[in-house]
Amino acid sequence: MASFEYDLCIIGTGHVGLPLGLSFIEAGLTAVGIDRDAPLRETINSGKMPFYEPGYDALIATQKFQVYDNFDIIKKVQNIIITVGTPLNNHIETDLRQIQQVLESLSNQLTAGQFICLRSTVAPKTTRFVRRWIKHHASLKVGKDIMLAFCPERLVEGNAYQELRSLPQIIGTEDKKSRKMAKSLFEVLTSELLFTNYITAELVKLSNNITRYVHFALSNQLALVADDLGADIYEIIELANYNYPRNHITQPGLTGGTCLRKDFGMINEKVPYSDMFLSAWKIHEYMPNFLVQHFLKRTKIRNKVVAVLGYTFKADTDDMRDSLTPKLYRYILRELPLEVRISDHYLPNPIKDEHNGELRNWPIEKALVNVDCIFVAINHTGYREALYPLAKKSPNTWIVDIWNVSQINKIFYQASALKALS
């Protein structure tokens, strides 16, 4: 490593890459980043976190991690970690454009002895594609000239600082030199390394996310069935789970995010038949419509003032990517409300949505004034406390609470039902 100026470079310094780079710096390595997003680079280089991820404010403030806009620095780094986006196209096809663009930029910069780590979530056989691409375009042989591994991240957003050190690191390699270099790099973060081949490592990552996705779909399906039959899903879950040793039913909710909402497709594009993954996707994508249509069985939205609490894809984060709340918002609009007030204390005002435009982000204390109905889209901290005063102030206000933040064990209820709990 003496011939290289930096230990590693993170290509793609977003929610996956930036915490990883900062954690390596804390572990004593030297690291730089590459990203094409100019505002992101400016924020990071000034010593500020561009998104909410606890534990990294002090680290980034040292400005030891700097991000560049070109690949000239690659020749100065020993280890190259690729963490760019791998979205799913509309036709259930993995979009590899960002990885291909990175490879094209790397082709003239690679130096013998470097190690490339693919960390983005990818479809099976993608790492083998990268190996073939390097041989074809850069005339370098993996395992001899250049080392290659697939080392997936499996973090929960908002808990990266702890989980980068506590979770076992899966390492997929297919030659001894690559395995040795991957081990040397990641053992500075965690001592628990699990070794396998490319495809198995790729499938481990997908299996973790798809298992959660299908599990949540089961709960959402049960919520649909329960409401159709006049039962409350949260009472069912409470009774079914109580002191029962053989399974655990999780709560329903709007299941989105850049991993759970797309990873099923990375396996699904490889098979021609329908399966439980596609069915899970259909259930999740229907949930915003379910909330609106089943709410309309109880009361109306037309000419009513509606509040939507939460706009991110999960609780206590500022990440809107692949959130289902924008979809819920559009379904509400179709019912011709008088006004829709979005409130999310993790997001700025206005909220800039690619599909819905600029939306006013209401302070929650104003969003709930003289409101006729409330959709709790995400279970952010603080929403439970915000709902309870409505029991006295606005007892007739309808609440759609898919996350059961009030702990009243109902999805659809009026604020008067909160009186006993408040």
Image (cartoon, rainbow, N blue to C red):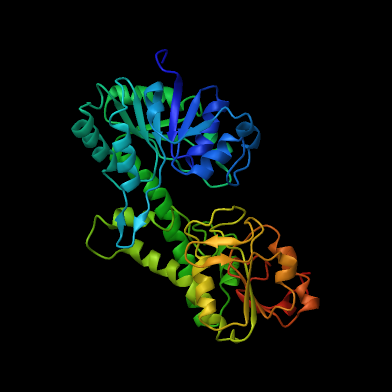
Figure quadrant of the N terminus: top left
Residue 219 position within the rendered picture, expressed as x and y whole percent measured from the top left? 49, 66
Q: Residue furthest right?
A: 392
Across the whole image, how many numbered discs are drawn on residues?
A: 0
**Residue at 72% over, 72% down:** 368
The quarter of the displayed image where residue 152 is located: top left
Evaluate whether residue 124 shows in this view: yes
Percent position of residue 398, x then y: 66, 79
Quarter holding the C terminus is bottom right
Image position, residue 27 (x, y; %): 55, 25
Nearest the viewer among 357 and 174 is 357
On screen, 139 above or below 364? above
Visible residue check, residue 15: no
Location of residue 91 in the rendering, given as x and y in whole percent from the top left corner: 29, 62
Looking at this view, is 260 or 319 the one in front? 319
Q: Does 262 sit left or right of 231 as displayed? A: left
Q: Residue at x 76, y 74 (%)?
A: 390
Q: Up-down: is 140 above or below 208?
A: above
Residue for point 60% across, 47% down: 52
